[in-house]
Image (tube, grey):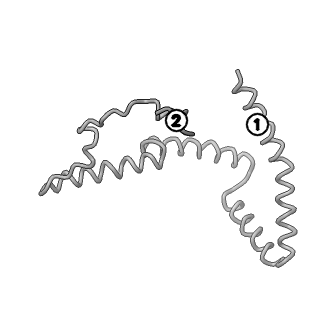
Amino acid sequence: MTDQGPFANWPHLDKPHLPERPEARRDLLILPGSDTSSQETSKMASNNTLEHFLGGSPLGTFVRLFFISLVVGALLMWLELRPIDIFRGVQAFFDRIYQLGFGAVKELVSYVLAGAVFVVPAWLILRLVNMTGSKR
């Protein structure tokens, strides 16, 4: 193996391959006539898939989302922004776009440019801060 090729520096190639333990792969084991085993296996697999999708346990995710929603909701109420007002604003935005026809493109571009005036410098500053912070 004198020629290691372009993938020689990949970390997973440096590690020796260890054989899997049989108990680690129980999800693939289905015994004939064993209905409960396949049901438990599918439950475990679906639970792992759900936890992977949610980023943790369903209860923990629910609690985090509850408290974040509480804080954001309190902030919005303090700013006197009600959910129905936000929905009406979005609806009015799309109604104006529809009524403008081809003029909608011009208004859409003006919205994007107005947002970009704030978003692009903030993004650039955050990128620069992250680059200098990672060199430490």
- The residue identified by callout 1 is 126
Mark 2–mark 1 Cα distance, whole angstroms, equals: 42 Å
Asked if residue 5 is positioned above or below residue 79 in the image, the reply reads above
Compared across the picture, whether 1 is left or right of 135 comes to left
Image quadrant containing the C terminus: top right
Q: Nearer the viewer, residue 92 or 57?
A: 57
- Where is residue 71 shown, x and y percent of the image? 62, 42
- Binning the other alpha carbons within 10 Å of mark 2 as few (below 14), some (14 to 19) or many (20 upward) gives few
Task: Tell me residue 47's x, y (percent).
Answer: 36, 49
Q: Is residue 54 left or right of residue 19?
A: right
Q: Helix, strand or loop at disc 1?
A: helix
Residue type highlighted by circle 1: Leu
**Residue type for callout 2:** Asp
Residue that carries the numbered disc 2 in the rendered image: 3
6, above or below 81, in the image? above
Q: Indicate which label's residue lies in the foreground, 2 or 1.
A: 2
